[in-house]
Amino acid sequence: MQTVRIATALTFAGIFLAAACSTPKPQPEGSREEVAALAPTGKLRVGVYTGSPTSYVAGGSGSVGPRGVAYELSAKLAKAAGVPLEPIVFPSNDKVLEAFRAGQLDLVFTNASAARAEYIDFGPTVLELEKGFLVRSGGILREAADIDRAGVRVGVSRGSSSEVELAQILKRASVVPLASLADAKRALVEGQVDAFASNKAILFEMSDGVPRSGVFGNWGSESIAFGVPKGRPAALAYLGRFVEQERRNGGVRSAAQRAGVRGLKN
């Protein structure tokens, strides 16, 4: 399983640069029991995946550094708890969840679906995102009504909630699971799929790198939240207080803006 571990010193570099001139907001204090439950190894191991502004987007040429809502807020959570952050970068969200189920992570940031709630205890919703489709201009698809037709191939992230939902929604089009967002972009550009379905934060981010592409449709929504392993109620309580405070003081909104998140529900 391919992962990338980022040095703690680099983790915090750049994240707070954009907010350096703002007045620091006090973070909720955690009891010794809560911090031990949140980070039982002495560091907060958070899983993120590449290509999604809600999770992690690597810094490019001329960029300050990596960005992503999960990346930034988990750094703030670790700092508030007084423990080092260890972000572990995966190529896809299904690999994040695989590592989480194997006990290799303390924290994830993902769609709080009913299926995932069977093995993840979720905190309060952080982001509400619309779902849609990404298509290439000049392709066979012009509007959402064109999607569910025989011969249309709709890409989805393998193991995602979109894969499960679209298999039930689409009656004529075929669903094509893809291993990563990088694979999805390549498949769309090369015409191996006619559309890619996901939340719109991911779709707009992908669209920036796919010439003459567009995002349309609204076939559902995702409630993105932090989650911890089952059996850690003290960690869940602390996580809940942290998220509620970040929502109240504008931390969530600021993190989403810095990450370039688009497609938020009104």
Image: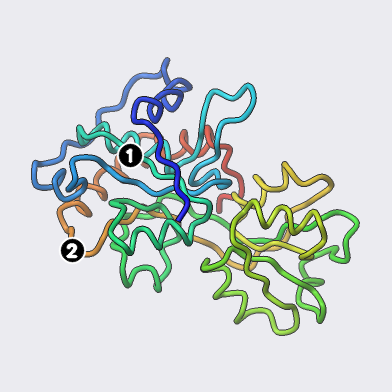
Which badge, 2 or 1, is on the more N-terminal residue? 1
Residue 238 drawn at (x, y percent): 20, 47
Foreground tag (2 vs 1): 1
- The image's mark for residue 206 is none
Q: Amino acid at mark 1?
A: Glu
Residue 162 drawn at (x, y percent): 57, 68
**Within-10-Å neighbours for mark 2: few <14, some 14–19, many 20+:** few
Q: Which residue is mark 1?
A: 86
Asked whether the beta carbons under mark 2 and mark 1 sit within 8 Å of each other, the answer is no
Residue 160 drawn at (x, y percent): 52, 66
- Residue drawn 71% across and 53% down? 185
In what element is the residue under mark 2? Answer: loop
Viewer-nearest residue: 197 or 83: 83
**Residue farthest to the bottom?**
171
Q: Which residue is mark 2?
A: 231
Where is residue 233, by image quadrant? bottom left
Q: Amino acid at mark 2?
A: Gly
**Residue farthest to the right?**
138
Viewer-nearest residue: 191 or 257: 191
Label 2, label 1: how far apart the Cα atoms are:
21 Å
In what element is the residue under mark 1? Answer: strand
**Residue farthest to the front?**
1
- Residue drawn 82% across and 45% down? 211
Q: Is residue 253 above or below residue 200?
A: above
Q: Is residue 94 left or right of residue 141?
A: left
Viewer-nearest residue: 146 or 138: 138
**Within-10-Å neighbours for mark 1: few <14, some 14–19, many 20+:** many
